[in-house]
Image: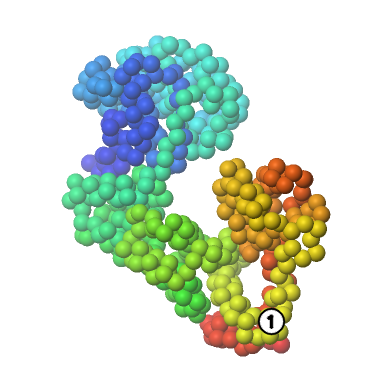
Amino acid sequence: MAKIALYRQYRPTNFDELFGQEHVATTLKNSVKAGNFSHAYLFYGPRGTGKTSAARVLAKAINCEHNTDGNPDNKCPKCLEINAGKTVDIIEIDAASHTQVDNIREVIIEKANFAPTSLKYKVYIIDEAHMLSKSSFNALLKTLEEPPAHSIFILATTEINKIIPTIQSRCQRFDFRRIDDASMKSRLAFIAGSEKMEVTDGALDMIIRASEGGFRDAISLLDQASDMAGGKITEVELSSVLGLSDFTAIEDYVYALFDKNTKAALEVYHKALENGYEPSQFYKNSLEILRKLLFASVSGVAEVGLGESTAKMFAEVLAKTNPREVLSILDIFIETDTAYKYSVLPQLALEAATIKIGLGAIVPQASVSNPTSQTVTEAKQVPVGQGSRKATPDAKWQEFLSEVKNKNNSIHAILRVCEPDFKGDEVCLTFPYKFHKERIEDTRNRQIVEEVLAKVYGEKYRVKCILRLSMANEPAVVQSAGKDDLLDDALEIFGGEVMS
């Protein structure tokens, strides 16, 4: 007999078992208990978060003869019939293979009016509902608007934006969340214990990262690992057998970036590629670590659920850096995203970003130690208040920042680091980073800034955003530093020579 997959064995049979979606389970259970459930539901959320499972539990609960506190008892004839898959009144439809109008008319519209065969309610579960064509949605609209009293519709989707508004407005919508790492880890540990599996904490962390918040994916990976590893499931088995990425290389790489050791960072990257790491996956995982590091540097608290080695690396990095430095490195990574998509040599994108981060780290030293570079740097800085018709009074500017904070915290945080300069009917905002400049240049954000300026200062101003340092002059600064170790490292790793 074929083995039953773990995700099927541990599929929820009632609302209390709907793991990680308590807000949905509680609402649905209360509606069934009170007998005032809706005729149409829309379940939205990432893959593997329990949408279809919740739909099946709901279908069973409303047909259960002796439901207890809104939960199906799984003992009555109706529940046993549904659990065995013998009923013809629970109709599951894969919208991906029923996209056309004729399919919807044949499977749903023409048959929805017929009374259920054995159950009290006929339930239609339409999975991947976003795959339906617009014509199919319109054909379904009338049935949803005036449904037969004995028919219930449950639509499940991962792409809510593709469900037309007229369908959404006729359904009760429930949003399913990604499962947080700590909850998923405890649940996976419980399943592993129940199945007599021996799994290390590090292996569970790798499975959780690979599943990206999808509980079904996590259980499937655990199931596959137990079959292929044979004995104890460790990080080594997961890396070699399932091809999951070990984060040790990512941690070493990120640590080298903040340690200003570009040569070591590149060596870690190249070794990871030799061991089978995909460049795009290495970039994605590095970006994830940098994101968590940024929040930790701002809040002072590392994210719950970090592995032991990752938490140790975070502590070491945060002891010698600040949010500005983390954000500047993250900006370079974000810019690299486009290069990955269009590069004919994907690994080059991260190599260039790594060297760019290293070069950026030595620019301030060069500008201080060399008089020429210092002059260039000073020329690139925009003086605050010089040549202005009206400089910014501190009190007024602080009042302006307070008003902005009331409207948008994100814009307020960015404006706090800028240097304002009022010139006639124009306000020049000088930013230290390109990311900040682009955020304020966004049409909606700029409008908010200009509206608050008019309110606080009593005059209308146009906002102009500029960078503190001109990108065009940066090579001059780096060149003035002379022959440096960083360029020697790059030459040693890549080979070649400097051409004048």
Amino acid beneath label 1:
Ser
Quadrant that contains the N terminus: top left
- Could you say whether the residue bearing mark 1 is in a helix, strand or loop? helix
Q: Position of residue 11 (x, y in %)?
A: 30, 37
Q: Is residue 210 above or below residue 313?
A: above
Front residue (pair 406, 286): 406
Q: Is residue 336 above or below residue 252?
A: above
Q: Residue at x 69, y 52 (%)?
A: 441
Please indicate whether residue 446 sits to the left or right of residue 61 in the image. Answer: right
Q: Is residue 302 above or below residue 488?
A: above
Please indicate whether residue 342 sits to the left or right of residue 32 in the image. Answer: right
CA neighbours of label 1 inside 10 A, class few (<14), some (14 to 19), many (20+) = many
Count of all numbered marks drawn on residues in the image? 1
Q: Quadrant of residue 12?
A: top left
Q: Position of residue 451 (x, y in %)?
A: 70, 43
Asked if residue 37 shows in the view, the reply is yes
Please indicate whether residue 115 sits to the left or right of residue 157 in the image. Answer: left
Q: Position of residue 8 (x, y in %)?
A: 30, 39
Q: Residue at x 59, y 81 (%)?
A: 365
Residue identifier under label 1: 373
Q: Position of residue 120 (x, y in %)?
A: 34, 14
Front residue (pair 291, 37): 291
The type of colouring in the image is rainbow
Q: Quadrant of residue 74?
A: top left
Front residue (pair 475, 215): 475
Quadrant that contains the C terminus: bottom right
Q: Residue at x 41, y 59 (%)?
A: 300
Front residue (pair 128, 191): 191
Asked if residue 56 shows in the view, the reply is no
Q: Residue at x 37, y 33 (%)?
A: 23
Q: Is residue 404 above or below residue 200?
A: above
